[in-house]
Amino acid sequence: MRLVLTEEQRELRDAVRSFLASASPLPRVRQAAESGTGHDPEVYRRLDGELGLSGLVVPEEHGGAGAGYAELAVVLTETGAALLPGPFLAGALATILLTETGEKELLPGIAAGTTVATVVLDGDRAINGAEADVVLALDGPRVLAVRGGTRTPLTTLDITRRQARVDLTGAEEIVSSAQGVARARDLFAVAVAAEQLGVLRACLEAIVGYAKLRVTFGRLIGSYQGVKHRLADMHCKLEQAESIVRYAAWAADEAPGELPSAAALAQAYVGRACFEVARDNLLLHGGIGFTWEHDAHLYYKRAKADEVLLGPPRAHRARLAELLEL
Amino acid sequence: MNLQEYRREARAWLEANAGNTEVEAAPDPGGVAAAKGFMARLYDAGYSGITWPREWGGQGLTQAEERAFAEEAKDFTLPTYVFSIGLGMCGPTLVDLGTPEQKARHLRPLLRGEEIWCQLFSEPGAGSDVAALQTRAVRTEDGWRVTGQKVWTSVAQHASYGLLLTRTDVDVPKHKGLTMFIVDMRAPGVTVRPLRDMTGRAHFNEIFFDDVHIPGENLVGQVNDGWSCAVTTLLHERLSISSGVGMGGQKDNPVAFDALRRTADTSDPVVRDALVELYVRSRALALFNQRLSQETRAGIFPGARGSAAKLLLAELTMFQADLATSLAGPEAVAYEEGGGGLAEALSLAPAMALGGGTNEIMRNIVGDRVLGLPPEPRLDKNVPFKDLTVNG
């Protein structure tokens, strides 16, 4: 089991982190989120062109970099921490599904950034459903695909990641396998957990930074045990969340037998921890955390949207109980 | 010898010498005699003091060998508990700070288990704030005279020697007037009393010093530099805890997940979800500990992040004892014959949250040293000890 990043993974992390810090800082995230497309196409052009991120886990013979899920997790943690708007996660989920179920035709376009794809995770709702060229949908063990058709944008909690209802009439079945779909669902859980880890980390960094600047009653607020101890507890959550994400990402690449329980564990722990840390980040900022201008609510809303993205949290816990044969 | 051969030989030795040992760290004299016999064999085979300098009786090997031996030893129950304070804290402190005479006199018998050591820092009035201690050492013609009381002293009833922290100057701020000594636990004026804790057993002792004479050559480090010596000892304590010394396995723990899944009624969805919560928390901490040890192996020193792991272990220990007793219902309160039951687990659970630094102290450490938060303003830093408010 490998729980520590390799040299190459650290380099990848640093490259993505510094790219996002310069190309998509939070003020730009807000602009993009409120723009027509909901994201900045220029950022995506560079993300795909300079960094090749959309094709990261696409096999080389289909135009991608053929990297592992551990590398994808590293990237999703950074895009999560930066609240990168737009269809990056959607594309990652679609890539996972197509790679695992054996449908390769769409992959070169996704890798090149010319095809925007997403997945309907629940009913007829898809993240970035309005922007996507291709929408994939799961119907039991079958995978359906639809191009075009009616898309109805929804106004949702998380303004940095849009959702839409997708009319699935006319969707066509593409090559799929029950086993591949099951594995893809577990990989979705790992991918979202990796993003949640980034959201969690960014929230802790934000409030720790503020605790070193903000003064009350003649003292920096971080010097009060009432604040310090909560930040210490948040740090404990970060350490455990990171350990679980590393483990689940390792299982995704190296230990397929452990993946189902690792994936359920990742959603059961990291989803909750992420929301709790995002909530406490907002609360410990005091009144300013409740304002629209402050970024705390963006993270808080993303954390909740992510926690319920793959179903209610109890579903992951029930799955874990089942896998543990309780 | 390469590491793999070393590991294989260590394993073979353990299988031959520790494989079937039923000798626990029993506090009775018979148990201690057996433990001393085992320790002598361990030393003679070259597995005691693996990283300690050769000239003082150690093996002069590296952390890699020590870790390899520790990993192999995890599968065995070694009766080394009574030596753990000496091996983990007092001995390493003497290696770092002792005089050549002290090292020559003490280290080999410590490593061979001939002499047991204890550590005498905490006092009834100085727990988390150990630098507030009040045990006085006053200079005499040929050494020092010590008066005061220590507490939470493990294995003192078996100990030949102790590492003692005293106050030698009350006219300077509290951290600047402390001095460390080696004390002969059999010296006149030393009284060791078992301290009955909330489990009903005596895991610790309290020690009374009534005009105890300590010869001048027993001074460790410099006079009034005891705080930095104590920091050295405590650093070794954390290292020995984080390397797994004294951490019992979960295998036979009646309140751990593996036991509860067998005993609890999992047809009840509320019970099932409670067990999922326990599993999630247990796995989260286990994976964090594994990551810390992988990082250490890769040369990333965990430092104060180990305090986060200790805090989480304390919380998990309380959580699982609470959960297990609640799941069991009225039966939980009945003590089991021979110990080891749920009632005992619940009674023992607070120990982890109090010993080796309370949860609040751990949170301070994580906040200050990991997150770099500003320190709490302090009233005691620059005030002469005699002018400070202390516990009566």
Image: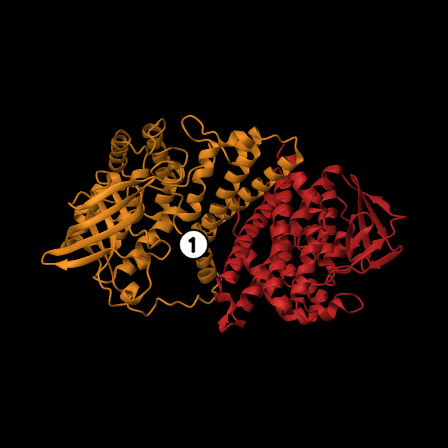
Residue lying at 39% horizontally and 33% vertically, measured from the top left? B76
Chain A visual colour: red
Q: Report the quarter where the C terminus of chain A lies.
A: top right
Q: Is residue B292 visible?
A: no
User: Residue A85 sits in which quadrant?
Assistant: bottom right
**Residue A312, image x, y percentages:** 71, 46
**Residue A320, image x, y percentages:** 64, 39
Query: Which residue type carries mark 1?
Result: Gly
Residue lying at 84% horizontally and 43% vertically, measured from the top left? A173
Q: Determine which residue is flagged by label 1.
A: B299
B98 is higher (above) or lower (below) than A82: above
Q: Residues within 10 Å of mark 1 (few under 14, many from 20)?
A: few
> Tag 1, which chain?
B
**Residue B329, image x, y percentages:** 56, 32
Tell which residue pokes out farthest to the front in this image: B392
Asked if residue A265 lies left or right of residue A233, the reply is right
